[in-house]
Image (cartoon, coloured by chain):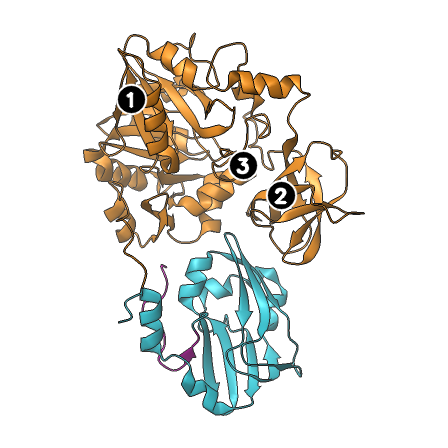
Amino acid sequence: MTTSAEALKRTALHGVHAKLGGKLVPFAGWEMPLYYGNITDEHHAVRRAAGLFDLGHMGRIAIRGDDRVAFLDRIVTNAVAGLAVGRARYGLVCNEGGTVLDDVIYYILEDEILLVVNASNREKIVAWLEKHRPDGISFEDQTDATAMIAPQGPAAAALLTEHSDIDIASIKYYRIASGTVLGVDARVARTGYTGEDGFEIYFDAAHAEKLWTGLSDAGRDAGMIPCGLGARDTLRTEAGMPLYGHEIDEATNPLEAGLDFAVKLDKDFIGRDALQAVKDAGGPKRRLRGFHVAGKRIPRPDYELFAKDGGDAAVGRCTSGTFSPTLGKPICIATIDASVADDAALTVDVRGSRIDLEAVPMPFYKRPKKK
Amino acid sequence: MAGEPNPPTDRRYSDTHEWCKLDGDVVTVGITDFAASELTDVTHVELQVRAGGTVGKGDKFGEIESVKAFSDLYCPMGGTVEAVNEKFEDDENAGLVNTSSFDEGWMIKIKVDDVADHASLLDADAYKKLVTGDAT
């Protein structure tokens, strides 16, 4: 017998997922759909038309107080000050040692900042914020009170344009606006984790079923289907986006993960000095790289990488590996010793067999530019 | 799609999620719908035995790769391999494990050494209890 696990949390859309026949699995303390039909079809739907994701498990924290910008600037690696209302940024929360506690998106709203964190790190980040909270700053964890759904894919913008009173075209990438969608008060952000154009919608959990069902019905003819966490993972992997616990964790700094674009060393934040020291010492000791994998076998996290022509000492380790539905072959992301040349021939040990790797630039997939 | 709730009663099951359907002294082996639904989309089935070869009870006979996981395949009964499902030589057909796990997704046929081994495997009820976790 196993001891009874703590009850899994359910999003406001749990009943919908069950009705749709979703394969429900435990994920970061939540019971979430892994897929409804199959991962491959859901993946292709997002690349070719649209997919609708329930992201209710993501942590949503409102930060309030006159000094909220200065406060968040201390907490995250990317810039907060200077961002106009309606702007969003991706950043890291680091500890004093410069390694990653979480990766987050924050939205500058009129009277507050909305911080969206990973489900697996929500309690840790709430505690971290509290630990560093000055007088005059308050937080509200809105995860249970709100819903978060994400129509992602090339057909998403037209769908929302038709069913929202917001001027969707005016919401550029990494911006957010308020209004209604299918009559429901909502904030609509042009953000996502798929590598496609798409949106993330935040609204009162009481309307979750109404908005999900309404958007699903409205998007059906355009090819939109519900998508689970399985496709979310294959899509983000193709897009070369890091997943906490894989590419980044408390043993990894953002520079090792190639996230320099989100690290502003010209401002003060927790972990800044440690990251400056990494740069001063010649840069990170390891780097993330992407590979196409020969053959049919898929490298999984923690499988070791080796130089092809020598040595039993591993030069790296796989952080994510999957079958890429878009490319039709296995791909993997690995963290590699910085001393290994970009063009060095590498192999990965897949359960005792050394499989050839072909280094490729990340992302593995880039969406076609609009004409 | 969340895994067949009622496994067919015309065959027996291993606790490693293979099914064994006996016809005379030849057993057909595949993996269950539950196992396939846990693996997610199967992308490659590698059968590591050939017709005419022998396989021992409990021996590994292949591997399955899926989008999210991999799994070794174990043979619940020993004997001489009569056939392998050649459809799996083409990865286009790997999805048969998901869409037709109990039928077209069969993997190998074995002329078994001891037919009596079949009765020692789990019946459909016992297997269902194993995967739904309500064994008492």
Q: Secondary structure at mark 1?
A: strand
**Vertical order, A26 against B88 (above or below):** above
**Vertical order, A53 against B87 (above or below):** above
Q: Earlier in the sequence, mark 3 or mark 1?
A: 1
**In the rendered image, which residue does mark 2 sit on?**
A317
Q: Residue at x 52, y 52 (%)?
A: B67
What hue represents chain A? Answer: orange
Q: Which amino acid type is marked by label 1?
A: Ala
Q: Find out whether residue B32 is within the magenta segment.
A: no
Drawn side of residue A45 relative to residue A110, left or right: right
Residue A247 bears which disc, if any? Answer: 3
**Vertical order, A340 against A332 (above or below):** above
Disc 2 to disc 3: CB gap under 8 Å: no
Give the Cα distance between marks 2 and 3: 10 Å
**In the rendered image, which residue does mark 1 sit on?**
A62
Q: Residue at x 67, y 52 (%)?
A: A349
